[in-house]
Image (spheres, rainbow, N blue to C red):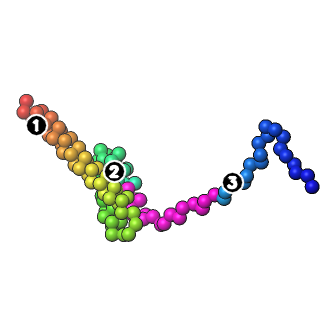
Amino acid sequence: MTEETAPAGATPPASTPPPAAPPPIIGPTNGLAVASLVLGILSLVMFWIPFLGWVPVLVGLVLGLVALQQPRGRGMAIVGIVCSGIALALKLLFWIFLASIFGAVHGFHHHW
């Protein structure tokens, strides 16, 4: 039997790559925590809308508080609560500011 040799300058045949690692196993997520996070972020965008803006703020807060009682998704629930809380504070300050502006304009109008 003769050995076959590769011609000079030729690359040896590539070895087969090792098998791919299996994908990581991801446990079930906490749907309430995810919903709280999404609503919290949405509430930061919608805080200035008069009536519709209250829905994501309040629902995000409630869902986040309920999600904290469950074993998974604690981080997302906390971020959802924080975002909703910030949006609630912004909403209250925004509407107090608008009411004071309109009140000042209305009072200024009647004064003259």
Could you give the CA–CA distance between mark 1 and mark 2, rounded to whole angstroms? Answer: 32 Å
Between residue 82 and residue 48, name the one nearer to us: 82
- Per the image, the residue denoted by label 1 is 107
SS type, badge 1: helix
| Residue drawn at the location 38% of the way across and 56% of the way down | 37
- Can residue 50 be seen by looking at this rendering? yes
Instruction: Measuring from the top left, give residue 71's x and y in whole percent.
Output: 38, 69
Task: Give left or right: position of 79 versus 94.
Answer: right
Q: Residue 17 bears which disc, if any?
A: 3
Q: Which residues are drawn in magenta?
A: 20-37
Tag 2 and tag 3, C-beta contact below 8 Å: no
Which of these two is toward me, 59 or 17?
A: 17
- Whole-number angstrom distance, CA of label 3 to CA of label 1: 79 Å
Residue visible at 67% across and 57% down? 18
The part of the image, by quadrant, that contains residue 34 is bottom left
> What's under tag 3, amino acid-wise?
Pro
Residue 96, percent across and down? Answer: 18, 45
Give the residue furthest to the bottom: 70
Residue 59 visible from this viewpoint: no
73 in relation to 88, above or below: below
Label 2 sits on residue? 43
Q: Please state the horizontal and vertical placement of residue 83, each as a whole percent of the image.
A: 31, 52
Tag of residue 79: none
Give the secondary structure at mark 3: loop
Give, as a three-letter code, the residue at label 2. Answer: Ser
Amino acid type of the residue that numbered disc 1 sits on in the rendered structure: Gly
Q: Earlier in the sequence, mark 2 or mark 3?
A: 3
Label 2 sits on a secondary structure element that is helix
Residue 30 horizontal/vertical position (percent)? 42, 65
Residue 84 in magenta stretch:
no
